[in-house]
Image: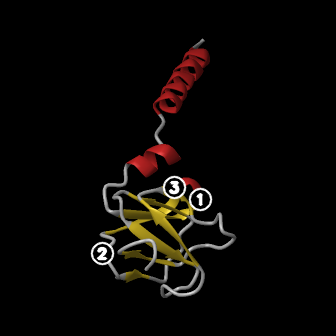
Amino acid sequence: MRMRRSLAAFFCVVSSVAATGISTSPASAATSCTSHVCTWTGKNYTGQQATSGGNNGVCYFNLTVKSYKVTDNKWMRIYDGTNCNGAYYLTKGSSGDATTHGWVAQSYKRVASDNN
């Protein structure tokens, strides 16, 4: 009888922990970004998070970016090169998977417009 109560208590604790969700979900990780730019080393906003002010023209380099969020409505170039060089794509005020272009982003910088 004592063993059954202990097991019942254990399962109550486990189910309440599971219900409250100790780990952060990908969606809440993305919404928790309060900086101008947040990046994650893993897809779906997982792994190590880094933040920056996304200052215009400044290259944020030597990174591994697999997901990102730009919280303001500014243009960002996301590069496959380590020092804001190589192939890139533009994004503006968005978030997403930085590997959709077939490579892992390694640097980024804010630009004044979509044609810079």
| Picture quadrant where residue 20 is located | top left
Disc 2, SS: loop
Circle 2 crowding by C-alpha within 10 Å: few under 14, some 14–19, many from 20: few
Labelled disc at residue 74: none
- Gap between marks 1 and 3 measured at Cα: 6 Å
Q: Which mark is residue 55?
A: 2
- Residue found farthest to the right: 102
Q: Residues within 10 Å of mark 3 (few under 14, many from 20)?
A: many
Q: Disc 2 and disc 1: Cα gap in Å? A: 24 Å
Mark sitting earlier along the chain (2/1):
1
Nearer to the camera, 92 or 116 = 116
Mark pair 2, 3: CA separation: 22 Å
| Marks 2 and 3 close (CB-CB < 8 Å) | no
Dot 1 amino acid type: Lys
The residue positioned 48% from the left and 56% from the top of the image is: 95
Question: Relative to the observer, which residue lies in front, 65 or 114?
Answer: 114
Q: Which residue is mark 3?
A: 45
Q: Secondary structure at mark 3?
A: helix
Rendered location of residue 90, percent (x, y): 51, 69
Q: In percent of the image, x 60 and y 19: which residue is there? A: 3
Quadrant the C terminus occupies = bottom left
Q: Position of residue 93 (x, y in %)?
A: 41, 58
- Counting from the top left corner in percent of width and height, residue 64 is at 54, 74
- Assign the N terminus to one quadrant of the image: top right
The one of 21 and 98 positioned closer to us in this rendering? 98
Q: Give SS at disc 1.
A: helix
Q: Which residue is mark 1?
A: 43
Is 66 on the left or on the right of 23, as rendered? right
Comparing labels 2 and 1, the label whose residue is closer to the camera: 2
Question: How many numbered markers are drawn?
Answer: 3
